[in-house]
Amino acid sequence: MPSETDLSSTCFSHPLPGAVGLSHLNAYEWEAADGVCGGTPHLHLVCTEAYVVTGGRGAVQTLSPGGYREVPLEAGSVAWFTPGTVHRMVQRGGLRITVLMQNSGLPEAGDAVFTFPPDVLADPERYAAAATLPARTGPLAEVAARQRRDLAVEGYLPLREALVAGDDAPYLEFQRAAARLVRDKVPAWRELWRAGALATAERTGAQLAALESGDPSYLTGSASYDTGPTRRGGYGMCGRRDEYELPGMTLPQREG
């Protein structure tokens, strides 16, 4: 599998539109300490994430400077969250979602940070141990994914309670802790962004310039592509995850 430094040169030869990432999720049905069934609360530092609901029902709980929200989800719903928004997927019956992720490659390189308690966030080694799964599938992966979800809920509930009470200090401190955790990864992320989303936007600019000059020769390189999931049923952040491991698409996550 390519290393993070290799990704910038290998992943984006034929990206999806806008160099987005793509995966499919069946939301977890595990009940958490507060009686809610669902996924692992987390935020992204530089990527907007979108849910396109394809079946079932549920909700997404979010924490942002605007406070706490719970958005109902059913087939046809679309919800999205900008960087810094804590989100938690809630399962209420067969919830199935297609996830569209900005900056394909960055979430898999550690852009997501879980809402673990402050003492775990303060220790990069403890955080990495709690965030990383021992395998993508199988009994050990399931146990670890559930433990990770429960630890994130443990840290999430006080953040939510404080925001509901009008106190945004714990939420803002969580954002700062998340930023500290990922700071050393930023140079590698910048290379992924340059090779993916930025290169895609720049290619559009070059195409517009060519059209303006009356030269459509770039169209001779047109082609069509298709694919399917290359890994099904992995343990993602919010549910069982069908992944894509082809150029320009969502690669297996290296969480932590």
Image (cartoon, rainbow, N blue to C red):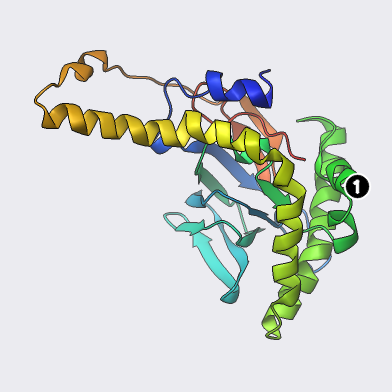
Please determine whether, in this image, residue 224 is positioned above or below residue 146: above
Q: Is residue 95 above or below residue 36?
A: above
Q: Quadrant of residue 201?
A: top left
Q: Is residue 207 visible?
A: yes
In percent of width and height, residue 109 lies at: 66, 36
Q: Residue at x 61, y 66 (%)?
A: 62
- Outermost bottom residue: 165
Query: Which residue is at the front of the view, 245 or 76?
Result: 245
- Residue 126 lies, with reference to residue 117, above or below; the image says above
Position of the N terminus, as image quadrant, is: top right
Residue under label 1: 126
How many residues crowd mark 1 within 10 Å: few (<14), some (14–19), many (20+)? few
Residue situated in front as seen by the camera: 19 or 32: 19
Name the amino acid type tagged 1: Arg
The x, y position of residue 81, in whole percent, is: 53, 58
Q: Can residue 40 be seen in this snapshot?
A: no
Q: Secondary structure at mark 1?
A: helix
Total of numbered circles in the picture?
Answer: 1
Q: Quadrant of residue 230?
A: top right
Quadrant location of the C terminus in the rendered image: top right
Position in image of residue 163 (x %, y %): 69, 78
Residue lying at the far top in this picture: please name it. 220
- Judge left or right: residue 33 versus residue 251: right
Residue at the location (88% across, 55% down)?
Answer: 120
Residue 236 place in picture, x, y as percent: 69, 41
Q: Depth check: 101 or 173 in front?
A: 173
Instruction: Answer with left or right where residue 64 lies relative to residue 35.
Output: left
Instruction: Say which residue appears at 39% left-offset and 37% top-offset.
Output: 18
